[in-house]
Image (cartoon, rainbow, N blue to C red):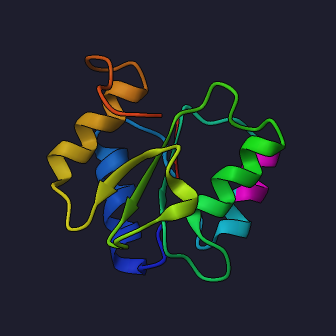
Amino acid sequence: MEDDDDLRDLLVTLLRISGFRAEACRSAEEALAALRTRSFDLVLTDYELPGETGGWMLRQAGAEGLLTSTPAVVVTGHPDPEDADDFEIVGKPFDLDDLLARVRRYTGQGPPPSGRGEAGLA
């Protein structure tokens, strides 16, 4: 999930050409609805989204039991994403190769992740 259309499209393209099936959502509410209907191997979300935050979406999904075996990564330029502190945070600007390496680790296509906590991009 990413609120910037260009960055969201870039990330989806990067994930797809890297062999992942990626689904993009434009808001926290849209991403939560997607999580309610199908499972993902990873949730990659921006923190600052229209309406609710990515942290809110992940906490809501967790409370509904939608993330029991699904890791989540929050990408943000926010200095204090307080409702996302239980998840791995990737600061903006970020390196695309590093982000892709994290996705690979979390989806079992690379070494185990050293940080906390099918790619869903919200």
How far across and how far down the image is residue 101, in percent? 23, 35
Residue in the image at 37% along x and 46% along y? 16
Q: Nearer the viewer, residue 74 or 42?
A: 74
> Does residue 89 sit above or below 66 in this rendering?
below
Residue in the image at 48% along x and 67% along y? 47
How far across and how far down the image is residue 107, in percent? 43, 26
Q: Nearer the viewer, residue 113 or 121?
A: 113
Residue 11 falls left or right of residue 120: left
Q: Nearer the viewer, residue 108 or 9?
A: 108
Residue 3 falls left or right of residue 67: left
> Does residue 3 sit above or below 30 in this rendering?
below
Residue 56 falls left or right of residue 115: right
Q: Does the magenta-highlighted stretch encompass residue 69?
A: no
Question: Which quarter of the image is occupied by the C terminus?
Answer: bottom right
> Does residue 48 sit above or below 71 in this rendering?
below
Residue in the image at 67% along x and 82% along y? 51
Chief secondary structure of the magenta portion? helix
- Residue 60 seen in render: yes
How far across and how far down the image is residue 116, in percent? 41, 34
How far across and how far down the image is residue 103, in percent? 35, 37
Q: Which residues are magenta?
A: 32-36
